Amino acid sequence: MKHAYLTALILIAVILIIGVGSQLLGIRLYDRIATNLLISLVLVVGLQTFMGNSGLLSFAHIGFMGLGAYTSAVLTIPAQMKGMALPDLYDFMKVVEVSPLVAMLAAGILAAVVAAVVAYPLMRLSDAASVITSFALLVVLYTIMNNWSAFTNGPRTLFGLPKTTDMPIAAIVAAIVVVVALLFKESRTGKLLRASREDEVAAAALGANIPHLRWRAFILAAFIAGIGGALWGHFITSFAPKAFYLKETFLIVTMLVIGGANTVTGAVAGTVLITIAYEGLRSTEGAINATSFGAGQVIGLTEIVLALAMIAVMILKPGGLFPNREIGHIITRARRKKETTA
């Protein structure tokens, strides 16, 4: 258990370095990138709590992010602006206005409740069937967001959210989510779930109720995704349903897979590396387009390179950069080995 505490300290230190470093630089662009990185970290670590412990890929995670973003938006847009931002909003909701922090918590709770209601039958599935049904759930959530005009303004951009998310808030939430993910991993539910990931038959023989264990992890992941979506909504302040579909899903999954889906350390490392690579590739793509002299625009370079990077990692290091052990365990083991040989 000591290595879990060490892992938590190291990962929180990484979050603090990102936050403090961007503040010290005093460059608005870097502060925006770092804040976005920490919001992505919340989402990736949330996905890791389910995918890393159960071994099942969930495409629906970004759908719950969208649910959280719209829930927080409806609860926090000033009453005098709701008539413009959400002209079809139900009358009883037009006068509702709560604190953004309260709305973020409500967003997580609603996402968790929806996950609890719809997901239990899906937790009995494994392998390809599980992946297909999670993608189908993403499509359902996206379709609802795209067509429920009273709640989301339909496919049009929703605006008017108060800009509440800043670097300190994003860093605090990211640190809390990392600790929650590590505690869940070390809990009885997390250990039994990982046992079922390795061998379902053996875990069931030990008395593990595998669908129920997966259900718990899925609810926790949805709760974190809902909070992450609310954080993002109050950072970007205007968005449309297309922000919660395939492109964002690909980016979040890439961060987790490259870092290592089985570890919280991998989720953090993948988020940091892919964010840096993503921003660098976007700058490169922009520079190429600015100097193309009419030779045509370069479009999609960022996505192509990230996809190729994920393919390369899957071939060369299938488990990601941190496949099995957390950073605290690696350091503790190296220290003991050094003491033994000394």
Image (spheres, helix red, strand yellow):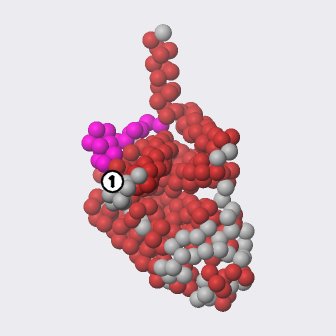
In terms of depth relative to the viewer, which is nearer, 152 or 305?
305
> For mark 1, does the 10 Å Cα neighbourhood hold few (<14), some (14 to 19), or many (20 or more) residues?
few
Q: Residue 109's spot in the image, x, y percent?
A: 59, 67
Q: Residue 268's spot in the image, x, y percent?
A: 50, 44
Instruction: Please state the extent of the stretch shown in magenta in the rendering.
Output: 307-326
In terms of depth relative to the viewer, which is nearer, 214 or 201?
214
Q: Quadrant of residue 142?
A: bottom left
Q: Is residue 77 left or right of residue 70?
A: right
Examine the rendering and report whether any part of residue 190 can be seen. Answer: no
Q: Is residue 94 above or below residue 24?
A: below
In terms of depth relative to the viewer, which is nearer, 122 or 303?
303
Q: Is residue 311 above or below residue 250?
A: above
Outermost residue, front side: 293
For the point 46% across and 64% down, the residue is: 62
For the point 56% across and 85% down, the residue is: 150
Q: Is residue 325 magenta?
A: yes
Q: Quadrant of the N terminus?
A: top right
Q: Residue 338's spot in the image, x, y percent?
A: 47, 16
Amino acid type shown at disc 1: Ile
Q: Is residue 65 magenta?
A: no
For the point 62% across and 81% down, the residue is: 85
For the point 40% across and 55% down, the residue is: 289
In terms of depth relative to the viewer, which is nearer, 199 or 284?
284
Q: Quadrant of residue 130?
A: bottom left
| Element under disc 1 | helix
Q: Is residue 269 left or right of residue 230?
A: left
Q: Residue 313's spot in the image, x, y percent?
A: 32, 42
Question: Pointer 1: what residue?
Answer: 304
